Amino acid sequence: MTAKKSKAKKARVRLASRKRKRIQKKAVAQAKKKNKTSLQQQVASIEELLTKNILDEKSERTASPILPAVLYNLNAATRSLAYQLGYDLGYKICATTRGGINALLTVLKNAGLGDMLYYPFSDMARISTLKKSPIANVGMRMHNYEAGIISGFMSNALSRKINVTESKCIYNGDERCEFIASPLPQANETAGSEQASITPNSLGSIMNYLVTSPPDSDTANGSYVMLKLAPFTRQPLLNATAKLFSSLGGNMNGSNLDKLARFLPGIEKIEVSRRKRRISGISVKYSKEYSSMPYVAFSSPFILGASASMLGMQSKEPKVAIKLNNDSSYTLEIKRQTGK
């Protein structure tokens, strides 16, 4: 009888253990699902806020649109992605604003294109910048994302598919940017998908020009730049940009860290610490509005590349830490490695 009781007790213990494990496993799965849903809601709310900001006519132009333009023009696949993502955004904006053309022109202005003129015709429309300062000529039309926005907006407004091509571009040696919109399929035959990829020399030329150019020479609304960069803050694009961003940051040669905010929106403060007159660390604080872990992870290789020469990273990798502040903003801390 004792043996039977002992055997039954062990069976109950095993059953309780399995039940406890099942409950724990279910709790972990629910927690993961909740966190994933929370993150998705956070991303959705951030993108909704950014979309609202780019429709604000009084939005200040705070950041250069060059980084997303470069990323979306790396090859035919990214140019196609740019057009489709722009299309989705334009379609959504049209639905939100009930199709008013001024809303589209405001978005394009906040994209860094400046004031725009709209010329409607019977079989096509032309949207052109009034004037634009010269910029580094990389021999490419760079605004496939903006062409997509126009296409999505007009397709929704007119209830028919409208193809849009950038026919002139300041990055292609033209004095202004110009877009041709038409329901005809051939309107998109010369789209950017047939263009060559950006070369390392072109990247260096772009960065060197912007680092030495006046602050207001090529700027866009920070929310627009952030919204355009958003797909690159998530996988699988996040890993693909790390090496490129490190190289781009390296073009700044460390002496222009104060200009980081011109390329990366949402940087509130940059502090350089010294020890015995030698730079020992760099602290980059993100503003609360733009603070999100994916964006910090996305932008950190660019900042690390820009900091390389200052911290002597060629000989030893620095210590990198991401700190969550009391106001829910993030700070990226980069410190020189000490010791042998």
Image (cartoon, rainbow, N blue to C red):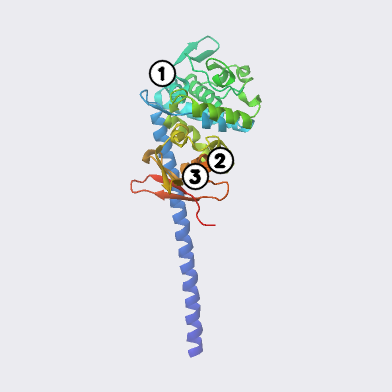
Q: Residue furthest left?
A: 327
Pick the residue in front: 320 or 86. 320
In the displayed structure image, the side of residue 198 where residue 7 appears, left or right: left
Q: Is residue 299 visible?
A: yes
Q: Position of residue 240 (x, y in %)?
A: 59, 41
SS type, badge 1: helix
Compute the Cα span from label 3 to label 2: 12 Å
**Which labelled disc corresponds to residue 297?**
3
SS type, badge 2: helix
Task: Give the mark nearer the N terminus: 1 vs 2.
Answer: 1
Q: Amino acid at mark 2?
A: Ser
Q: Is residue 1 visible?
A: no
Quadrant of the image occupied by residue 272:
top left
Mark 1 or 3: the one toward you: 3
Residue for badge 1? 102
When the figure is inspected, residue 305 is found, relative to residue 75, above or below; the finding is: below
Q: Residues within 10 Å of mark 2 (few under 14, many from 20)?
A: many
Residue for badge 2? 246
Q: Position of residue 43 (x, y in %)?
A: 44, 41
Compute the Cα span from label 1 to label 2: 38 Å
**Which labelled disc corresponds to residue 65?**
none
Task: Give the mark nearer the N terminus: 3 vs 2.
Answer: 2
Q: Residue furthest top?
A: 122
Screen quadrant of the C terminus: bottom right
Quadrant of the image occupied by residue 169:
top right
Task: Give the mark nearer the N terminus: 1 vs 3.
Answer: 1
